[in-house]
Amino acid sequence: MSYRQTLEFLLYQWLDAETLSQRTRFADHSRETFDAVLETCERIAREKYAPFNRTVDTEEPRFDGEKVILPQATYEAQKAYAASGMLSAAQDYEMGGMQLPYTVEAAANSFFAMASVSIGSGLLTAGNANLLMAHGTPLQKDVFAKNEFAGRFSGTMCLSEPQAGSSLSDIATRAVPDGDDFASDPLGPRYRLKGNKMWISAGEHELTENIIHLVLAKIPGADGKTIPGTRGISLFIVPKKLVDAQGHLTGERNDVALAGLNHKCGWRGTTNTLLNFGEGKYPVRGGAGAVGYLVGEPGQGLRCMFHMMNEARIGIGMAATMLGMAGYHASLDYAKNRPQGRPIGPAGKDATQGQIRIIEHADVKRMLLAQKAYCEGALALDLYCARLVDEQHTGSVQAADEARLLLEVLTPIAKSWPSEWCLEANSLAIQIHGGYGYTRDFPVEQYWRDNRLNMIHEGTHGIQALDLLGRKVLMENGSGLALLADRIGTTIDRARQHPELLEFADQLELALQQVGAATRAAWSTGQPTEALANAVPYMQAFGHTVLAWIWLDVALTALGAASDVANQGRLLATRFFFRYELPKIGAWLNVVQARDLTCADFPEEAF
């Protein structure tokens, strides 16, 4: 079964995405236009991305002292992607967009992640522009966001600093008003920034006319001191090259300089940078520091940035999913064609008989089935979250609010679960290839290296876990968790109408009860130190419960569809997940429920 068939089943039969065209915003669309978008993206990914995945891995970005050098294939891919209109696919017509449902946009973009994730397909540029659409002034939208959507400019997010990492409360980049008339600039209140930012993906290149950095910094008070913690963080637009109020380049370089390139295990085709802001390499007339324009209100930078971070987290979940999917399809093809060994039993003792293909071995089938369960389940989760985005924007008032709540709870899972378990799928793909999998003669080792970043990308695994157990399941008096439980309960009730699924319905109900009990037990003392000591095991159990729900819901659709080998595969993958994966949550939740402090209390000297 091809990936396209899997995608279309989830999109049209499970999520019923075609009905979105009945909504006013999407009224110009139909199944035909959705399919045309998928076809275009699949073709560009096949022609401009996939053939060069190894090229961008081996020809890493380098700096010649003046500019970053990238393979020509990267320029061609960037040009083709921008020309496709996918950067602005979900935007209003007035912004040059297609008013495409985000569900379809996410599905279409999945082809690029599968073909070559490190060439990139505009994830940060689109997220940057979408943030400005939500929090920028009309002119900031017109000058910066519109040019990003058109592919003329690209965008980044600049959060981390060498001394702060994920601890954003400790950032030291400062922004001071640029003269007495700083508030009169038509592009927004104008500041001068000084500081250093680390791990900036696509922070320096020549792929576009300009790079628009969204930078977190602190504005000092009259006493020269900044507000401690995250309350003092503001957000600024800092273009690499200065522009006028019409979006034209002025010819003056902003004081943003490349301090160095980071060389990572994977995603080698994407430049990853350390940037210096305002340190004098490219001095701007009228003062010292890089010119930046305030977005939103002072002190509200982190709230604004979370708009981009949450979108990026779902995007990283999709990237992790598609890397797992690429490894799954590669190892499936290898297993079907690689002869090795003989059957277990009397027939296998006859050495004169020919070898069997490795897919005929039960353990290889186990590894393939695990990959299928992880990757297709993660894809379903990603698309479900994308469908919630459309519901939040175009549904009724109640449906939109419910979608918002569900997204709050599910976003940490949509990012973390694929990044952990689709990485495991990549590991299994290497195992199926045997010694060959560990060589560069086959692509699966690169898929693993590329995917290893995603447990760190856009908030580490531990940060997602703290967000889930420390905030999301508690917010609004637990209403998001209660709503999710209600949705899961509805699927359980439907599954109980089918004898083939009754066993799984009972298992999922028990798992849901266990997660609820562990959540209450974790917080029973009201002590965050105790409650959050095992946040990652909690998130693992929570995620497996969510994926069991997703698979059971998919199985219901498969049961009601044509009785073919593809749907048989979905039903068997559901069985695999419930019998091999869901039972794992007991061990994870035991330490959560007991508020076990083995890890938290372990003395440093004992390591």
Image (spheres, rainbow, N blue to C red):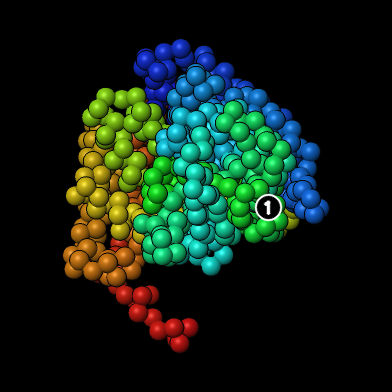
Foreground residue among 328 and 259: 259
Residue drawn at x 21%, y 47% as measured from the top left: 476
Residue drawn at x 30%, y 58% as measured from the top left: 470
Residue drawn at x 25%, y 47% as measured from the top left: 481
Q: Quadrant of residue 212?
A: top right
Is 8 positioned to the left or the right of 472 in the image?
right
Q: 328 above or below 455?
A: above
Q: Quadrant of residue 226?
A: bottom left
Give residue 26's position: percent from left, percent from top: 42, 17
Q: 265 above or below 105?
A: below
- Residue located beneath label 1 in the image: 283
- Mark 1, residues whose alpha carbon is within 10 Å: few (<14), some, or many (≥20)? some
Is 98 positioned to the left or the right of 272 in the image?
left
Residue that extends furthest to the front in the rendered view of this protein: 180
Asked if one can make out residue 477 in the rendered structure from this viewpoint, the answer is: yes
Is 199 positioned to the left or the right of 6 in the image?
right
Foreground residue among 165 and 448: 165
Residue drawn at x 30%, y 43% as measured from the top left: 504
Q: Quadrant of the N terminus?
A: top right
Give residue 562's position: percent from left, percent from top: 42, 22
Q: Which kind of residue does numbered mark 1 sit on?
A: Pro
Q: Secondary structure at mark 1?
A: loop
Give residue 290's position: percent from left, percent from top: 60, 51
Asked if one can make out residue 318 in the rendered structure from this viewpoint, the answer is: no
